[in-house]
Image (spheres, rainbow, N blue to C red):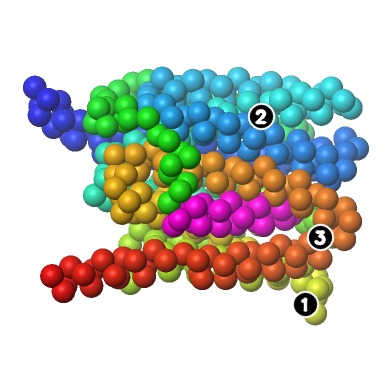
């Protein structure tokens, strides 16, 4: 009977993977739509860059808390549905908040961003986790494909916002509100698809293994995991310290209107999409090598966001080039990090928990950076300006890459194991 059930699950897992990819796509599309839309609105209502950072950081705070809790729970269809319904209702309320001002707007926006982070994580963590279980022999390929879906969602977000800006000029409606109402409608459609087409049985696959409690204190005693997660966190901090304020910079310094800003944001995500595809298909480099390259390339991209500090003119073309380099470096890192963590966990005899830990740390690590990065970025930008902040973040990320390269011994240990096998 068990064999029949497992066989039935395997027949449906490709369909389930498509639904999971759609979930990841939508979760990131809705997230990305807020990045170009929300900071200018907060600025318009009279708040400073530091205030923008505080409001925006409530999203990753919710994501961190949710990912930590979800990492200790058995993934289920119910959790995903609760996340979808949460996103639907929050999008509607956030659209209505456009009419508020002052302290009430600040407090309500912060609370809603916090709840958004929780709901989004309730969609993503179970999706990545169950993919790791269903495709344990193809985890690098499948996670990279989910990252392609993620990046396609990040492309769709600004594209939809940009098209709405164009239509708003023609038909005279508020882009911020209608973007959120559209998001709510799309979440409604996806909820219907999940109810009818996401097979509940995939969440019961190997349930006896998933019931084992994860002790994160013990997990972080693994040196390679500690170094990898810490570097990933700092990558998120350096990247998000600038990214949150780029839409304001494009408007005030480069005179780029809102519609064109949305399309510029797509450059990074398009490049990231192909970066994830390369990670899924390439066989020449180890995951550790690829991740090290991502850290160094990412540091180069960040310095280009402040071209005046390195003797280059303030040109929108340099910003576009910076986004291309950023997509290659920073944008490709998430496609590598979960397979790399799974590889580390399996090597240290934690194969049964590898998928849960990988999915949790993938979301939690970036969310921690997303939480702290905008606050640090807002403080630095208020004090020294955007261009100098880009140099500081670039130098910090280069240092992180150097430290990671010198302290991570994943490849060396793997080579040692292979040599021992050859000798025996």
Residue picked out by circle 1: 310
Q: Quadrant of the N terminus?
A: top left
Instruction: Tell me residue 322's x, y (percent).
Output: 65, 67
Q: Quadrant of the C terminus?
A: bottom left
Q: Earlier in the sequence, mark 2 or mark 3?
A: 2
Q: CA distance from mark 2 to mark 3?
A: 26 Å
Give the image quarter of residue 184. top right
Which residue is nearer to you in this view: 381 or 147?
A: 381
Q: Secondary structure at mark 2?
A: helix
Q: Secondary structure at mark 3?
A: helix
**Magenta stretch holds residue 63:** no
Residue picked out by circle 3: 386
Q: CA distance from mark 1 to mark 3?
A: 13 Å
Look at the magenta stretch and give its main secondary structure: helix
Which residue is nearer to you in this view: 400 or 201?
A: 400
Q: Earlier in the sequence, mark 2 or mark 1?
A: 2
Give the image quarter of residue 254. bottom right
* Left-right relation of 193 to 9: right
> Contact, CB < 8 Å: mark 2 with mark 3?
no
Instruction: Tell me residue 275's x, y (percent).
Output: 46, 61
**Residue 148 visible in this rendered orientation of the protein:** no
- Residue 114's mark? 2
Residue at figure coordinates x 87%, y 25% from the top left = 103
Badge 3: few (under 14), some or many (20 or more) residues near its Cα, within 10 Å?
Answer: many
Q: CA distance from mark 2 to mark 1?
A: 38 Å
**Residue 177 visible in this rendered orientation of the protein:** yes
**Magenta stretch holds residue 238:** yes
**Extent of the magenta region:** 223-246
Q: Residue furthest bottom?
A: 311
Q: Secondary structure at mark 1?
A: helix
- Residue 232's mark? none
Q: Earlier in the sequence, mark 1 or mark 3?
A: 1
């Amino acid at each position: 009977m068990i064999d029949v059930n497992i066989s039935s699950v395997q027949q449906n897992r490709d369909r389930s993977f498509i639904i999971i990819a759609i979930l990841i796509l939508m979760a990131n599309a809705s997230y990305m739509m807020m990045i170009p839309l929300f900071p200018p609105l907060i600025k318009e209502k009279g708040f400073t860059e530091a205030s923008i950072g505080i409001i925006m950081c409530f999203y990753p705070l919710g994501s961190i808390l949710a990912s930590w809790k979800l990492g200790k729970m058995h993934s289920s269809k119910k959790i995903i549905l609760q996340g979808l319904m949460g996103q639907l209702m929050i999008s509607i309320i956030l659209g209505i908040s456009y009419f508020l001002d002052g302290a009430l707007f600040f407090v309500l926006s912060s609370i809603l961003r916090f709840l958004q982070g929780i709901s989004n994580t309730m969609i993503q963590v179970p999706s990545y986790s169950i993919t790791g279980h269903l495709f344990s022999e193809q985890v690098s390929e499948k996670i990279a494909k989910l990252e392609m879906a993620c990046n396609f969602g990040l492309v769709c977000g600004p594209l939809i916002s940009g098209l709405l800006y164009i239509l708003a000029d023609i038909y005279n409606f508020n882009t911020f509100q209608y973007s959120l109402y559209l998001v709510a409608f799309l979440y409604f459609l996806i909820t219907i698809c999940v109810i009818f087409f996401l097979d509940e049985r995939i969440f019961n696959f190997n349930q006896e293994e998933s019931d084992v409690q994860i002790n994160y204190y013990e997990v972080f005693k693994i040196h390679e995991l500690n170094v990898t997660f810490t570097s990933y966190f700092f990558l998120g901090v350096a990247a998000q310290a600038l990214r949150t304020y780029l839409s304001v910079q494009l408007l005030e310094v480069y005179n780029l209107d809102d519609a064109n800003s949305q399309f510029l944001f797509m450059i990074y995500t398009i490049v990231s999409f192909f970066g994830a595809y390369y990670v899924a298909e390439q066989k020449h480099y180890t995951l550790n090598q690829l991740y090290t390259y991502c850290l160094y390339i990412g540091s180069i991209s960040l310095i280009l966001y402040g071209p005046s500090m390195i003797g280059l003119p303030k040109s929108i073309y340099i910003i576009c080039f910076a986004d291309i380099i950023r997509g290659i470096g920073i944008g490709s890192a998430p496609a590598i990090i979960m397979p790399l963590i799974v590889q580390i966990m399996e090597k240290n005899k934690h194969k049964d928990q590898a998928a849960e830990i990988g999915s949790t740390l993938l979301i939690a690590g970036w969310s921690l950076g997303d939480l702290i990065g905008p606050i640090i970025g807002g403080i630095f930008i208020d004090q020294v300006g955007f261009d100098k902040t880009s140099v500081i973040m670039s130098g910090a990320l280069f240092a992180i890459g150097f430290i990671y390269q010198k302290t991570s011994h994943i490849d060396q240990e793997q080579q040692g194991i292979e040599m021992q096998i050859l000798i025996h």
